[in-house]
Image (tube, rainbow, N blue to C red):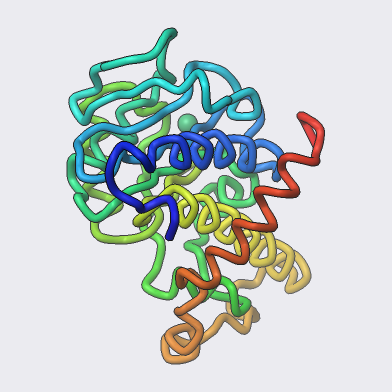
Amino acid sequence: MTSAKSGRGAEPTLKRDVALANLIIERFGLSNAFGHASGRIPGTNTFFMPTRRSPGLASASTLLVLDTEGKVLSGRGTPNSELWIHARIYAARPDVGGVVHAHPPACVCLTQIGQPHRVVHNQGGAFYAGVPEYERVGLIRTRELGDLLARKLGSGLAVMMRGHGITTALPDVRAATVAACMLEESAGMQLRMLAAAGGDAARLRAYTREEAGSVSDQISPRVVERAWEYYALAAEQRPLGG
Ligand SMILES: [Zn+2]
């Protein structure tokens, strides 16, 4: 993927991607005043992250550079207080190049009715291995809590955070953003199906493990490229709060 290019020449593209990722999570209703997306500077333990504002107000020219110890290395302004989510996931997962943290309503609702994410439509197949839940409520404002969250995420793509939101972690910020959008879409469908089934989870025709495995390629580079093209363009055209 283009955002995974190495060397300093790739930085303008990465900055643009990180800013767009933040816009996307706000414009598509995954977060409003809160939430943040970041992108690792390839081959380093540093990453681009926006300042402490709504993700809908992020811009490529005002991103900060942080390291995995939570230190601000460059840029003006204060980072988001949940910077530890990003810092400690990048520290624990050298394979991760993009992290998205958002507060999407359908995912939060699922955690609060005690329902794990289920694969209920094809695009949910990206999460066929299951989405673990971080049960502790409250924000991730310390290094220790960041490490706890990273442990709960394990080697997966996403973690649900009870009463709080989600965090996705993938090879680059585009994929992490698309995964966050897909997870919220999937959770929204699961909630609607549960409501239509009178709240009886047993009536849900959730995909079997085998069926879910057969549609597990929903987050392949080709899918990400196509979905990113759409989300990025639509986010740039939608108004703030749209
Ligand atoms: Zn949060």
Residue shown at 47% from the left, 45% from the top? 166
Name the outermost residue toward the front.
Answer: 9
Name the outermost residue toward the top.
Answer: 77
Residue 214 at what x, y percent from top left? 47, 89
Residue 199 at what x, y percent from top left? 68, 66
Q: Quadrant of residue 187?
A: bottom right
Residue shown at 47% from the left, 24% from the top? 50
Residue 209 at what x, y percent from top left? 42, 85
Which residue occupies the foreground of this view, 22 or 85?
A: 22
Number of numbered discs on residues: 0
- Say left or right for 210 vs 30: left
Say above or below: 169 vs 191.
Answer: above
Residue 228 at what x, y percent from top left? 60, 57
Q: Quadrant of residue 155?
A: bottom left
Quarter occupied by the C terminus: top right
Residue shown at 65% from the left, 81% from the top? 203
- Say left or right for 113 vs 139: right
Residue shown at 37% from the left, 44% from the top? 135
Say above or below: 113 vs 50.
Answer: below
Which residue occupies the foreground of this view, 143 or 218?
A: 218
Say above or below: 201 vs 230.
Answer: below
Quarter occupied by the N terminus: bottom left
Say above or below: 63 vs 47.
Answer: above
